[in-house]
Image (cartoon, rainbow, N blue to C red):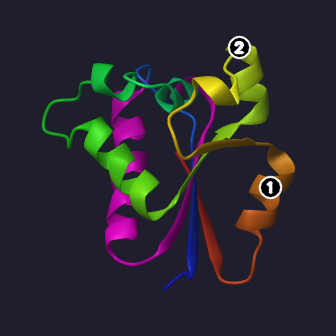
Amino acid sequence: MAKKLVIKVTAGADAPERCSQAFTVAAVAVASGVEVSLWLTGESAWFALPGKAAEFELPHAAPLPDLLDSVLAGGQVTLCTQCAARREIGEEDTLEGVRIAGAQVFVSEATADGAQALVY
């Protein structure tokens, strides 16, 4: 099993199944004791803001706020620097525990010894 799972989610409400899959995998991995780093990029960037996950709906899927809370409690959630800038999101706007970082940090995490990277 990977020592660390780095998950990049690019989808949001525009592709709800893909989005939900990424958050579900991240939350299950955290619950399983895997070190998780969830990256919010593209349309998923909006979920770094308070209340935005609650607006997401997908029948027969776990509620996105619950999944996000699980990852925040036991893993790392990162908002892409460029994605944040394009949406005029600053660190002061994000949920507590969400960091903003760029490609260098993603590459460092994804290529670390024992890491496995997934992109949704």
Estimate the x, y position of residue 1 in percent, counting from the top left.
Answer: 48, 86
> Which comes sooner in the sequence, label 2 or label 1?
2
Q: Is residue 109 above or below residue 76?
A: below
Which residue shows up at 77% across the image and 70% down it?
A: 111
- Amino acid type at image mark 1: Val
Q: Secondary structure at mark 2?
A: loop
Distance in Å between CA atoms under marks 2 and 1 = 21 Å
Which residue shows up at 39% across the image and 78% down it?
A: 33
Estimate the x, y position of residue 12 in percent, counting from the top left.
Answer: 46, 27
Instruction: State whether residue 87 appears in this view.
Output: yes
The residue indicated by pointer 2 is 88
Q: Is residue 23 left or right of residue 80?
A: left
> Magenta segment, which residues?
15-43
Which residue shows up at 79% across the image and 28% down it?
A: 82
Q: Is residue 47 above or below residue 120?
A: above
Estimate the x, y position of residue 64 in percent, counting from the top left.
Answer: 30, 37
Q: Is residue 50 magenta?
A: no
Which residue shows up at 30% across the image and 19% down it?
A: 55
Which is nearer the eye, 83 or 74? 74
Q: Secondary structure at mark 1?
A: helix
Q: Is residue 40 magenta?
A: yes
